[in-house]
Image (cartoon, grey):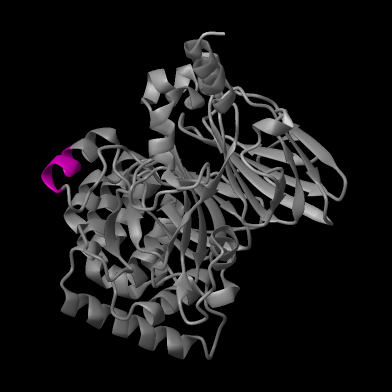
Amino acid sequence: MEPWDKNMKKKRKRSRRPVRLRCSVMNYDWGIVGRHSKVARLFALNSGSDIDPAKPYAEFWIGTHESGPSYADSGSEPVSLKAWIAQDPSVLGDKVVDKWGADLPFLFKVLSVGKALSIQAHPDKELARVLHKLHPNVYRDDNHKPEMALALTEFEALCGFISVKELKDMLSSVPEIAELVGVGNAERILLVNEQHENGKSKTDLESIFSRVMLLSKDTISEMISKLKRRLNLEKKKRQLTVKEQLALRLESQYPADVGAIAAFFLNYVKLNRGEAISLGPNEPHAYISGECIECMATSDNVVRAGLTSKPLDVQTLLSMLKYRQGSPEILQGVSLNPYTTRYLPPFEEFEIDCCNLPQSAAVIFPSVLGPSLFLFTAGKGHFDAGLPEDDMVKEGDDIVEEGGVFFVPANTKISITAKSTELQLYRVGVNSKIYRDL
């Protein structure tokens, strides 16, 4: 065999070989502190490092984004996953390379939320390009960032705007907001909305929400002081509503912040483990508490307007928002087999599989035309890519346990067997619908 043929054969072997990843962690102040954080435990097991009991652990990043890159453990010296892919883009599959180039189109995270994240939205592709060009140090990516959150624990979030009926109820039950709007305007809104509940309601919602978000700090501080005094008196006489309790919680975390008022305009969602929500571009949201798997298109663009000490861009957020009203859809996933559930968002870049294997059970992930990332969150098992033993990078690479992360190339079938009481894992890949559409 000619040397060229030997190299090509070696390359073909490499293009099907999974590779272990060492991943990055983010210690944002809203994270869960120390060993109570799933992110902390995953990062410690993945990296071999110790957990700082006094430090918040917020996000565990798996992917190629430069803000938190993963590294391929494929030789004596770790190389970034992005550089490793660039050496042989065929690991992504031809269809993915043709559509997105020589990079992963998705970013995979685990979040441990100890206190609320900012009220935020992510720009669509067109706005992302504009913002990146104007403010590249703030908006580092020219890509959109649709995302999905899949609950690992009970998970609280605010997402999207409340319905027309809830808007009316809010104006009737939150005098601090009604006072801002004005009694005459509030009454007009209530009457008009009963006759024209769509277009007019959207205009009124946008007007009121914008007015609240653009209030001066002094006005917001006074408004929240009034709200606190009233609710602290009323809770002695009645059970506060979920939104009223939430407003007090948010104010305690971020004193005198407009987010405590903004929460009344947004849908409150409580997810159980295994439930998910998807969030498109220009949709307002804020994660409140709990732990989740999060996946998104590869981007880190965030436009913030409250509940944060980070820089705000209120005018941009207000101009980009979709003022669509109504409760978000709660995704339950679709069963693929007795152990695996798939979550398909309305976005091309990604899908999520959740797999829970009882002891000695086995499952096969069929080969697909694009790459996958596997994260093991509990238990111990055997991981088989169907390659000859001498093709493994090093001894023990077929053993997986909590904290293990793998990049799996396109066109590679994976078999997994649980060796412990239960093996829990998540797989992220390109949304399978694109392979049917292309």
Q: Residue at x 51, y 86 (%)?
A: 235
Residue 198 in picture, x, y percent from top left: 36, 40
Q: Can residue 182 be spotted in the picture?
A: no
Q: Is residue 129 left or right of residue 152?
A: left
Viewer-nearest residue: 122 or 46: 46
Farthest front residue in view: 2
Residue 177, by quadrant, is: bottom left
Viewer-nearest residue: 329 or 413: 413
The correct choice, above or below, for 13 with respect to 75 in the image is above
Q: Can residue 389 be spotted in the picture?
A: yes
Quadrant where the N terminus lies? Answer: top right
The correct choice, above or below, for 158 with respect to 250 in the image is above
Residue 204 is inside the magenta segment = no
The correct choice, above or below, for 270 with respect to 298 in the image is below
Q: Is residue 165 left or right of residue 220?
A: right
Q: Which residues are magenta?
A: 130-135
